[in-house]
Image (tube, helix red, strand yellow):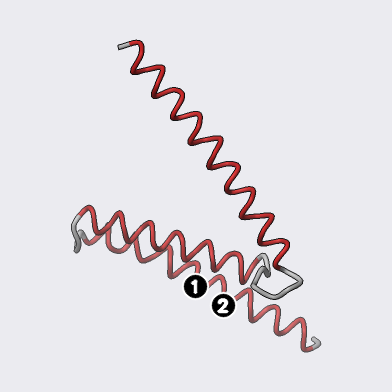
Amino acid sequence: MNREATQARHQYITGFALALFLSAIPFGLLATGAISRITLLWTIGLSAIVQVCVHFYYFLHIDLKRSHRDDLQLILFTILIIFLMAGGTLWIIGNQHAMMM
C-alpha cells in the first residue's frame, strides 16, 4: 500500500473510533442514570454537535483550508435553509393552532 492509502485508512479508523466514543457517552449515561435529565439532554446535544464536526472532518474531509471552504459554506447554507423551512413551518402551524383554539 502506498502512503496516501495508509494515511486515509488511519484517518477513517480515527473518525470511526471518535464517532463510536461520542455515541457511547450518551448511551452509557442514560443506561446508568448517573446524571439528571437536563444534564443528560445537554450532554446528548453537545455530543451530537461534536460528532457532526467529526464527520465533517474525518469522513467528508471538510476543514478550514481554502479549497474546502466553499464546500463548508455550501453545507452551512443548506442547513440554514432547512432550519428556516422547518422553523417557518412550525411557526405557521403554531399560529394556526392558536387561532383555532
Q: Is residue 7 left or right of residue 92?
A: right
Which residue shows up at 22% across the image and 53% down it? 37
Task: Classify 10 Å Cα crowding around label 1: few (below 14), some (14-19), many (20 and above).
Answer: some
Which residue shows up at 35% across the image and 66% down it? 25
Q: Quadrant of the N terminus?
A: bottom right
Comparing 85 with 3, the one in front is 85
58 w.r.t. 93: above or below: below
Place of residue 63 in the rendered image (x, y in percent of width and height, measured from the top left): 64, 72
Mark 2 touches mark 1? (CB < 8 Å): yes
Q: Which mark is residue 57?
A: none
Q: Which mark is residue 18?
A: 1
Label 1 residue SS: helix
Furthest toward the top, the residue is 100
Label 2 residue SS: helix
Mark 1 is on which residue type? Answer: Leu
Which residue shows up at 58% across the image and 41% down it? 82
- Dividing the picture into quadrants, the one containing residue 2 is bottom right
The alpha-carbon separation of the residues under discs 2 and 1 comes to: 6 Å
Task: Classify 10 Å Cα crowding around label 2: few (below 14), some (14-19), many (20 and above).
Answer: some
Q: Is residue 99 left or right of residue 58?
A: left
Q: Which residue is mark 2?
A: 14
